[in-house]
Amino acid sequence: MQTKPSILFDSNFAELLLGSMADGVFTLDRQGTISSWNPSMERITGYREAEAIGKNCSMLTFNRCLDTSCPTGIKECGILEIGSFDGKECFLRHKNGHDVPVLKSARLIDGANGDILGIVETVTDLGEVYRARKILEETARQLKKIHSFENIIGKSSEIQQVFTALKAAAASEATVLIQGESGTGKELVASAIHFNSARADMPYVTINCSALPETLLESELFGHVKGAFTGSVRDRVGRLEEADGGTLFLDEIADISPLIQIKLLRVLQEREIERVGESKKQKIDIRIVAATNKDIFSLVNSGAFREDLFYRLKVFPIELPPLRKRKDDLRLLISHFINLQNKQTGKQVLDVTPSAMRILMDYNWPGNVRELENAIEHGFVLVNDRHIDIFDLPVEIRQCEYAPHSSKWSSKSDQKNQPQKKLTREFLIDVLEDSHWNKAEAGRQLGVSRTAIWKYMKKWDIPLRKP
């Protein structure tokens, strides 16, 4: 019987083959001496072919050869008895002294008579894989840092109550309903609950319920099968299914239709879903965190929201206070946003001026923390100094409506039982006289900014200095 010639040991073909491979390949004779060394081995190890040929493979100092560290000779490594091994992750020592992560395989080559001709070993450089792993690990670490409780800024008693509730929510599996005005940080609170919970390594999926009409929201939440409706050309996994094992954040939950309310109630009760156009039920393991800026209890009383769904959602309610009710946190928040903008813009703004701070403290902040962040960003666009001043702030904040606070001009009982005294030209002149025409002091007495005093004086043609 005629034996086909083996192309493996045809020198020309072998040279072309080994030279074109991205993986490192080298061969050993029966004594464990390196007999060939392809260009990729030169790249991975730093050793040129002339430096490697004739040397023992122990020159590479593999930290793992089968289940042991690299032995001194081929007889000790075990390859002669085992015959082959595949995919051992280990490190080899580069010529320059650093360790290179590799995936190593080895195989005996038998001759026609059954005797051993040599050994072929392949080495795959895992440097990019290890770098990608480190990036993923660092990303996960940064993600947890971004969503930590520490990023919820505040020291007021109102926000401390929120911190206590957050820690309790993160330690449980209860469904959470977050309520608060727009801009109070409901999304930040929801992500903090997930990334500090036992589900932190599982998916965190979000959806804005007010952004989609009923039919699209149903498909987005539950998924659909091919042909379920016009345009559904393939199966689609819904957000509920994507969040399996993790957390689904339903923002603006009060805006969902009665149909979606019924379907969502079934999910909360049965922990199973059906894709649109499919009758097969599928079990899911998810935690739901919902949020709304509306008074959902009044919607229940009016019949616009199902009472049974409401109580399923508010197993653990968290109420976020508006910024106007925690003015003690304003200074901390302003410093936080200034630091963020300094990093993003490269500027070195230190603070806001006292007069600008007075305006910021007097403002009612209907847009809450989000509006404050935008105001500081607006200030960074205009600021030319190390401090954000009055005219660096948005015009709607600078021109806030006059609303006097307590002062020597009205007693506490007057403020409680009577409307505030209307600011007139004569009244302002009396205040200026009493404050020796100091505009800042007049502003403090009236509860407005110095800029507001200037504007009233200009409006009523009051001289800037005492006549």
Image (tube, grey):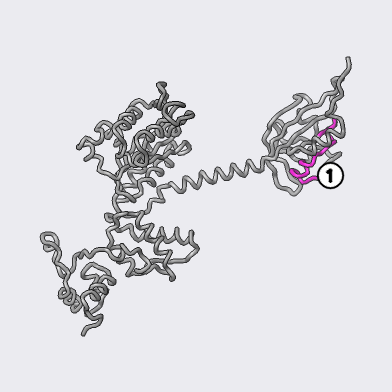
Q: Where does residue 87 sit, x and y in percent of width and height?
A: 68, 31
For the residue pair 190 and 95, the one nearer the viewer reads as: 190
Q: Tell me if I can see residue 391 in this picture.
A: yes
Q: Is residue 34 magenta?
A: yes
Residue drawn at (54%, 46%), measured in percent from left and top?
A: 138
Whether residue 286 sits left or right of residue 18 in the image: it is: left
Quarter assignment of residue 71: top right
Find disc 1 in the rendering and name its residue. 51
The residue type indicated by label 1 comes to Glu
For the residue pair 164 and 361, the one nearer the viewer reads as: 361
Q: Where does residue 277 sit, x and y in percent of width and height?
A: 41, 25
Q: Is residue 141 magenta?
A: no
Residue farthest bottom in this picture: 467
For the residue pair 328 and 322, the one nearer the viewer reads as: 322
Residue drawn at (77%, 36%), measured in percent from left and top?
A: 25
From the viewer's perspective, is residue 385 above or below residue 337?
A: below
- For the C terminus, the image quarter is bottom left
- Assess disc 1: are there few (<14), some (14-19) or many (≥20) residues with their C-alpha within 10 Å of its C-alpha: few
Residue farthest front in this picture: 230
Q: Where does residue 357 sit, x and y in percent of width and height?
A: 33, 66
Residue drawn at (33%, 32%), measured in percent from left and top?
A: 260
Element under disc 1: helix
Residue drawn at (88%, 14%), measured in percent from left and top?
A: 1
Whether residue 372 sits left or right of residue 462 in the image: it is: right
Quarter assignment of residue 238: top left
Residue segment shown in magenta: 27-47
Whether residue 374 sits left or right of residue 15 in the image: it is: left
Q: Tell me if I can see residue 244 in this picture.
A: no
